[in-house]
Amino acid sequence: MSPVPSDSVGSGSGHLAEPEAVDEFALIADLFVPLTGGHPAARGLADDAAFLVAEPGTETVLTVDAMVAGVHFLPDDPPDLIARKLIRVNLSDLAAKGAEPVALLLAAAFPHDVTADWLRAFAEGLRQDLTTYDTVLIGGDTVATPGPLTLSLTAIGRVAAGQGLPRSGASVGDDIWVSGTIGDGSLGLRAARGELNGLSAADVAFLADRYRLPRPRIELGPRLIGLAGASMDVSDGLIQDLGHLCRASGVGARIEMALVPLSDSASRAVDFGLVTLASLLSGGDDYEVLFTASPRFAEAVAALGGSLGLPLTRIGAIVAHADAVTVIDPAGSPLVPVEGGWRHFRAGQRRDV
Ligand code: ADP
Ligand code: MG
């Protein structure tokens, strides 16, 4: 599609308030072609489509996530961080499937008043994380919009055929594990909005960074093949996502709140009464990996966490009650989420910004 007309992004005119100021093709040539890393699949972004050679014995894993200004990031967030979060939330889905990133496709709808400086910073953010995660951009689409900045990234990954990790592989008796820490993303959104008065500047900065720059666990995912039964990434809140995993597997889960790993900053936020532990379990934007494994693999899982320098924490076990997630509070009492109960929590934890 080509609704973004005339002139050049490279014109150096700075502010592109005129709709005719950005040229789609100059934008692609100047900013996006360098992000292909010369990958043959991209064909120099000079063809209608990319051509990716299929590797025998592998499956292609595809995922897409959209991000909209004012919904998934703050409209005035730095453009490089927006670009990097876009890449990272998609790579998180690949990681949870045990897949390695291969290439990305980007569909971008830029507001008419986007500036050349903004676009350059955005492309620089893409470049930075393409390098970090050793992947390339092989295509996409660029349009202008009268609405908010809207970005959609498709991530293409690869996994040995039949080895990808499903949500549906949990068995009764499995341990439930989670990587990293839970709750930093939702607290980080509040930190980024200046709503965490009482925490130190260092804690606020740590949490805001966790919201703006998730750490996709791409080194973990492929190593879980052979250990994990079910796996998914935690993006919409630990409890809700665990519920999805349970439904897909036809099992229930029992987790202990006191075992859920918190960062030091999040622990302090709980201690200071800025947030409840229960609400952290329902907050979004964690981008950690939630997985199940037979207890016979417990030592291997712990050793894997050690070798990756990534905390892997057992938070509970899979039980037979289909679909039900039971949370045991730190005093040992079960908090069975009643219909609408967790939903009520989530209403106070809206992802809208
Ligand atoms: P078409 O009109 O055939 O859809 P376009 O003119 O939109 O193709 O795009 C031309 C080339 O530029 C294609 O290779 C496309 O994949 C690439 N491209 C366009 N926008 C982007 C983008 N935002 N990121 C990466 N590649 C892009
Ligand atoms: Mg075409």
Image (tube, rainbow, N blue to C red):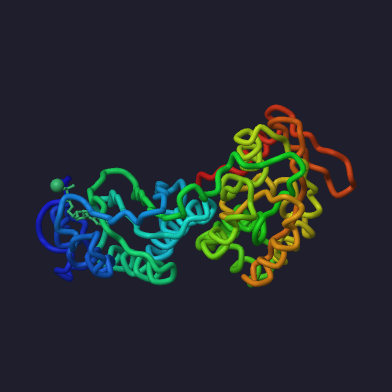
Outermost residue, top direction?
Answer: 339
Q: Quadrant of residue 336?
A: top right
Residue 311 spot, x, y in % from top left = 68, 65
**Is 342 placed left or right of 113 in the picture?**
right
Residue 211 spot, x, y in % from top left = 55, 59
What residue is drawn where x is 52% and y is 50%? 163
What residue is drawn where x is 89% and y is 45%? 332
Residue 38 spot, x, y in % from top left = 24, 69
Outermost residue, left direction?
Answer: 6
Instruction: Please tell me whether residue 88 is drawn above or below residue 150 in the rendered image.
Output: below
Nearer-the-camera pick, 286 or 37: 37
Residue 319 spot, x, y in % from top left = 77, 38
Instruction: Please tell me whether residue 191 is drawn above or below residue 93 in the rendered image.
Output: below
Nearer-the-camera pick, 137 or 56: 56
Nearer-the-camera pick, 127 or 168: 168
- Judge whether residue 21 can be spotted in this image: no
**Is 213 placed left or right of 134 in the picture?**
right
Q: Quadrant of residue 223?
A: bottom right
**Is 193 placed left or right of 302 in the picture?**
left
What residue is drawn where x is 28% and y is 63%? 119
- Judge whether residue 35 can be spotted in this image: yes
The number of numbered discs placed on residues in the rendered structure image is 0
What residue is drawn where x is 17% and y is 45%? 1
